[in-house]
Image (cartoon, rainbow, N blue to C red):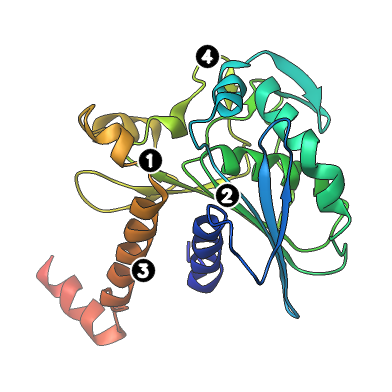
Amino acid sequence: MKLDPVLLNMACSWAMKAYNDSNKDAIKIESRVTGATACVRKRKSIDVIAFRGTQKKANDILTDMLVVPVPYVKRLCHGGFVAQHASIWGEIKKHLDPKKRTLITGHSLGGALAELSAAKLNGKHDNINLITFGKPNVFFKGFKRPMKLDTQISCVNGSDMVARIPRLCYGPSKSQVMLYFSNTGPDYINPSKDTRLADRGDIKDRVADHSMSDYQKRLKNYFEGQEKVKPINAEARKQMEKMK
């Protein structure tokens, strides 16, 4: 499977920018009650919605703790994430064009809010692209049914513990593609559960591997590695067959 480097790098850039309060080229949307924050960048070819991740504030901690499932987007979802999303979604909708290509992204909690946004727009808007980094689980098991999006990628660092919680009764959408940055070797697209279990690093790495700056570095390394892999031409393939 070939992943679009332009779209992934754009998502990564805006997931980083979502933590910056001085994005002059974007519309900032924020709830004083829940602390949920997003920025909307309207461009000629694409609109971008980027959600800010956890910042260790009191309302963020309460959000993470509120794991009771509640009905939302025709599913049962993590109650804390729903409360944050609902607090700013009405304002975000005002800036959306249903016929325009849209990229939705975010890191950590921001990734969870991005996934809920994609679920809101699923089947209603054309050309929705969801790319998240270190996203926790959003949907209650049994309600993880696929979404029909143009792109749905979850980037996960091997030792990132946030990308595996809540473990009990929750999981990601079944239609997502996982780009997995391993600890011990090559990176993977949609690795098996056994591969991920075998790859998990030390406990000391599980916080550092969650940072957005580390995701940015791993994504850059991934695409640089892809550039080094040259396709096998017909003549080279014949030589390989002779060596077997």
Percent from the top left, x then y, of residue 10? 54, 68
What amino acid is labelled 1 in the image? His
Q: In the structure shown, which secondary structural element does the residue marked by tag 1 occupy?
A: loop
* Residue labelled with disc 2: 106
Percent from the top left, x then y, of residue 58? 56, 24
In three-dimensional space, the C-alpha distance between marks 4 and 1, rounded to whole angstroms, equals: 20 Å
**Residue 141 sits in quarter:** top right
Q: Is residue 156 above or below residue 220?
A: above
* Residue labelled with disc 4: 168
Could you tell me which quadrant the C terminus lies in?
A: bottom left
* Residue labelled with disc 1: 210
Q: In the structure shown, which secondary structural element does the residue marked by tag 2 occupy?
A: strand
Could you tell me which residue is drawn at 79 percent across and 35 percent down?
A: 87
Percent from the top left, x then y, of residue 90? 87, 44
Q: Is residue 123 above or below residue 4?
A: above
* Residue labelled with disc 3: 223
